[in-house]
Image (cartoon, helix red, strand yellow):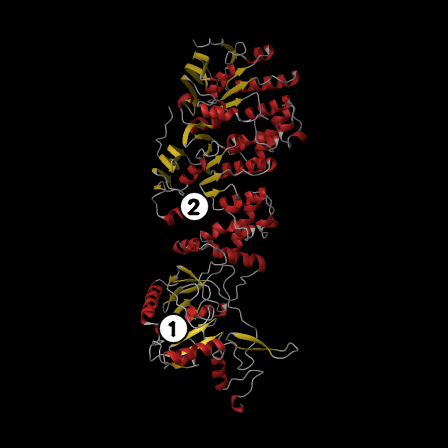
Amino acid sequence: MIRTEGLAKTFTLHLRGGMQLPVFSGIDLTVHSGECVVLSGPSGAGKSTLMRSLYGNYRAGAGHIWIRHHGGMVDIAASEPRIVLAVRRETLVYVSQFLRVVPRVSTLDIVADEPITRGIAPDEARDMAGSLLLRLNIPRRMHGIPPATFSGGEQQRVNVARGFIAAHPILLLDEPTASLDAENRSVVVGMIQEAKARGTAVVAICHDADVRAAIADRLYPLSPAREAA
Amino acid sequence: MTAVPNGHDGLITARGLYLSFGAIPALVDVDIDLWPGEVLAVVGESGSGKTTLLNVLSGRVAPDAGAVLYTDPEGEQHDVHTMPAPALRTLHRSDWGFVHQDPKQNLRMNVSAGGNVGERLMARGARHYGTIRAEAIDWLTQVEIDADRVDDLPRTFSGGMLQRLQIARTLVTHPRLVFMDEPTGGLDVSVQARLLDLIRTLVARLGIAAVLVTHDIAVARLLAHRIAVMQRGRVVETGLTDQVLDDPQHAYTQLLVSSVLQV
Amino acid sequence: MTEGYNFAYLDEQTKRMIRRALLKAVAIPGHQVPFGSREMPLPYGWGTGGIQVTASILGTNDVLKVIDQGADDTTNAVSIRRFFARTADVATTTHTADATVIQTRHRIPEKTLRDNQIIVYQVPQPEPLYRLESSRVETRRMHGLADYGLMHVKLYEDVARFGQISISYDYPVLVNQRYLMSPSPIPAFDNPKMDRMPALQLFGAGREKRIYAIPPWTAVRSLDFDDHPFRAINASEPCGLCGATDSYLDEVVIDDRGGRLFVCSDTDHCAERRAAGHIGKDGFAEAAE
């Protein structure tokens, strides 16, 4: 589902006099359908950066990111923005650590937005969103409120709901359980396992050893790049 | 591999735009592509040329060099700056729309809300009062203005309502392309959020393409698929909105992004 | 004829200039043609435009009729009629049927005009979009592109506010399916008479320096909505003097107790009917006079 070839990323900080900040290089990562690969390595090893590159959020410095999209392979690293958008709309989901949404939109509508744009009837989409939120222990009375005032854990669960409602074939998860309690952690783990069983390819970052053990099929180790000479 | 588009079926294709006001370059070698249903944000500080770009793309100001091509629903391409004035005007009142920062520039302040919304329909030849009025009321509701305000003069409306009325007036003919110049500028933050959500929803539902000029990066992030960053008349960086904002490549974009206050 | 003046007051060069404007106006029905309006021996608003048009088309054999609000005997009508009697020595008449040129302010005679007659309208404001769009550059552009949505906005506002189109005079028309035109401040009642009129219709606006025209047999349509069609409104009573039910009526207050009388605005029409023996409820037999 995902295959990177010689993927590299270096940040250039123009505001620091053009300082070069190499993050990783030579990444060859392959993820198959129904498989969960957890990116491992110490802080600063570039796990989030790699994940964001896979999503097309960060621009690849070199190499290719092949994503299976509609039966063909698309190189996210070399595609036009609208191709990347189409891949995200139908194939690729990214659950980040932070919830970023339009102010004043209700939690329910935020989660229901994806199926509605996919063409599902708004009422049906809201039903789907509602039951997903309930499963993640977001009580119904909170569904009508914008999530801006929610706690960190609640916002993260809203974010997870938003990612999982799409049921896209590829799921990128950046610390999906970081600020969750044990009960909610196990709900999310269950959802990830169900997704894998459906054949979803999962790439995750997670520091929690229990969660990692529960979801990972294998680890992909990353080590901090040396400063460029 | 999926087919890579050949670059000729875009809604707007602008190539090599130059324009200077005296010694001041307003546009320098600007290329712009806009696809159907795509929202492109043009960001940059005051004087970077973004409003000039909007005026050139919409045919209101002619460039010194370069061309702006528009592809109509029949797939035929028109050079916006050489097409006859009546054709351009017809375009502006049917296929295209323009949303100004100051709604008073676009609205008729001594004409009722319903008349303001109905004007484009009547200009296009609608001659049934009942239908025009029903459509006006429908659009007022869509922009969250009470139907019973249909006969009120815009004078009695708040700034946010005026902006929503302008949007209803613009979208009533279902344009394929809307030019927006700082649509949320000059509004209270709370009113801005509501308007942003409204624009986002309508644009997505109607599949409207838009060129959005804003100095507010947060607005660009919420509304736009793609961003073009302008500095001193040049497009210095362009790409996916989140890519440009989260991983800016050009020095100026990095400065721009790092200057935004985090809330 | 008064000594010291050219025939019909204006010099021949000026008349030629105005005739050229008239020809252009006839060629583009409803289109406003600029002309070099001259100072006339009467104030703006008294018909300086109409009088210049009349002066330019008058020949020695013409018979002139002048009406003001339908009446031949008001100051304005009498003055202009006498003016041409003195400066052009033309025959004048009050009978619509006898006239070859009819100059009018605010009315069209009731009697159907013929193809050998010309009617000249005095126009205070030739621009029908004048109250809606203050920029002349913009209104010219609207005319150029036949972009008349704004005029319909005005009609829309009327229906929204009053339940009907409330324009009772100077009701905008579309000439020959192309140009939006002010018919001058005639009552909307007269609008249908303009449509496919056998006579040539000329319009002169002196202060605004514009001439426009409707050639004979040209389609003139009053703007309206499909579901609020144009209607010619009139008083609901017959003429008190001649009993006419199909003519435009003026309301006249006849005493201090609020007594009112509706009479034909077209004095010639009323007199002719009474001479033919028609008597209204407030009228009296012509013979008894």
Question: Can see residue B128?
Answer: no
Task: Please give the chain letter of the residue carrying mark 2.
Answer: B
- Using the image, tell me which numbered label, if any, was put on residue C199: none
- Using the image, tell me which numbered label, if any, was put on residue B92: 2
The x, y position of residue C173, in whole percent, is: 45, 63
Up-down relation of residue C28 to residue A201 (above or below): below
| Camera-nearest residue between C90 and A194 | C90
Neighbor class of circle 2 (other Cα within 10 Å; few <14, some 14-19, many 20+) is: some
Neighbor class of circle 1 (other Cα within 10 Å; few <14, some 14-19, many 20+) is: many
The x, y position of residue C224, in whole percent, is: 48, 60
The x, y position of residue C141, in whole percent, is: 41, 53
Quadrant including the N terminus of chain B: top left
Residue kind at label 1, given as amino acid type: Thr
Residue pictured at 56% horizontal, 18% vertical:
A192
Q: Which residue is mark 1?
A: C54
User: Helix, strand, or loop for circle 1?
Assistant: helix
| Camera-nearest residue between B137 and C172 | C172
The Cα–Cα distance between marks 2 and 1, rounded to whole angstroms, is 43 Å
Q: How many marks?
A: 2
Up-down relation of residue C175 to residue C71 (above or below): above
Quadrant including the C terminus of chain B: top right
